[in-house]
C-alpha cells in the first residue's frame, strides 16, 4: 500500500508535534532538576555555615572549660594551703575554717561549672547530625546529577 503525499505530510506533522511535546517535557524536567540542584547547593551552604558556627562555639566552650579547670585546680591548691595553715595556727582557727569553707564552696561551684561545660558532647552530637544531613544532601545531589546526565 502506497501512501499519498497528504498522508505522508500528516504523519510528518504528527511526528513533529510529538517531538515538540517530548522536547517540552524534557525541558520542564531539566528545569526542575536545575531548581533541585540549586536548592541542594543552598542547603549545603547553610549546613556548612551552621557547622562553622558550631565549631566556633565548641572552641569557645573548650577554652572556657580549660579556664574553669585551671581555676578549679588553683582553688583546690588554695584550699589545701588553707587547711595546712589551720593545722599550724590554733589562734586563727575560726577564720581559717571560714576561709576553707568559702574556698570549698567556690571549688564546688567551679566543678559544677566544669560539668555544665562538659555538655559539649551535645554540641558534638549536633555536629554529627549535621554531617549526616550534609552527606544525605550530597547523596541526593549526586543522584540528581546522575539523573540529569542520563
Image (spheres, rainbow, N blue to C red):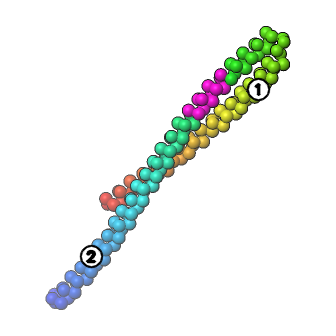
- As for residue 66 lying within the magenta part, the answer is yes
Q: Nearer the viewer, mark 2 or mark 1?
A: 1
Q: Residue 65 appears at what percent x and percent y?
A: 60, 32
* The N terminus sits in image quarter: bottom left
**Label 2: few (<14), some or many (≥20) within 10 Å?**
few
The residue lying toward the viewer, choosing from 52 and 103, is: 103
Along the polypeptide, which appears first: circle 2 or circle 1? Answer: 2
> In the figure, 4 relative to 59: above or below?
below
- Residue at figure coordinates x 50%, y 45% from the top left: 53
Q: Is residue 59 left or right of residue 40?
A: right
Q: CA distance from mark 2 to mark 1?
A: 87 Å
- Residue 128 visible, this orientation: no
Q: Which residues are magenta?
A: 63-74
- Overall secondary structure of the magenta stretch? helix
The residue lying toward the viewer, choosing from 73 and 51, is: 73
Q: Residue 116 appears at what percent x and percent y?
A: 66, 37
- As for residue 91 lying within the magenta part, the answer is no
Find the residue positioned furthest to the top: 88
Q: Residue 115 appears in which quarter of the rendering? A: top right
The residue beneath circle 1 is 102
> In the figure, 17 relative to 28: above or below?
below
Q: Is residue 62 left or right of residue 74?
A: left
The residue beneath circle 2 is 19
- Residue at figure coordinates x 57%, y 37% from the top left: 61
Where disc 1 sits, the SS reads helix
Q: How many marks?
A: 2
Q: Residue 43 appears in which quarter of the rendering? A: bottom left
Q: Is residue 37 left or right of residue 77?
A: left
Q: Residue 51 appears at what percent x and percent y?
A: 49, 45
Where disc 2 sits, the SS reads helix
Amino acid at each position: 500500500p502506497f501512501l499519498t503525499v497528504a498522508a505522508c505530510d500528516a504523519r510528518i506533522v504528527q511526528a513533529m508535534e510529538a517531538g515538540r511535546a517530548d522536547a517540552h517535557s524534557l525541558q520542564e524536567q531539566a528545569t526542575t532538576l536545575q531548581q533541585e540542584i540549586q536548592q541542594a547547593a543552598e542547603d549545603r551552604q547553610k549546613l556548612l555555615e551552621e557547622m562553622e558556627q558550631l565549631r566556633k562555639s565548641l572552641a569557645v566552650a573548650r577554652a572556657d572549660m580549660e579556664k574553669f579547670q585551671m581555676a578549679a585546680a588553683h582553688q583546690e591548691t588554695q584550699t589545701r594551703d588553707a587547711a595546712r595553715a589551720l593545722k599550724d595556727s590554733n589562734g586563727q582557727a575560726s577564720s581559717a575554717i571560714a576561709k576553707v569553707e568559702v574556698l570549698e564552696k567556690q571549688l564546688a561551684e567551679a566543678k559544677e561549672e566544669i560539668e555544665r561545660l562538659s555538655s559539649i558532647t551535645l554540641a558534638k552530637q549536633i555536629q554529627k547530625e549535621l554531617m549526616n544531613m550534609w552527606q544525605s544532601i550530597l547523596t541526593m545531589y549526586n543522584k540528581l546529577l546522575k539523573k540529569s546526565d542520563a
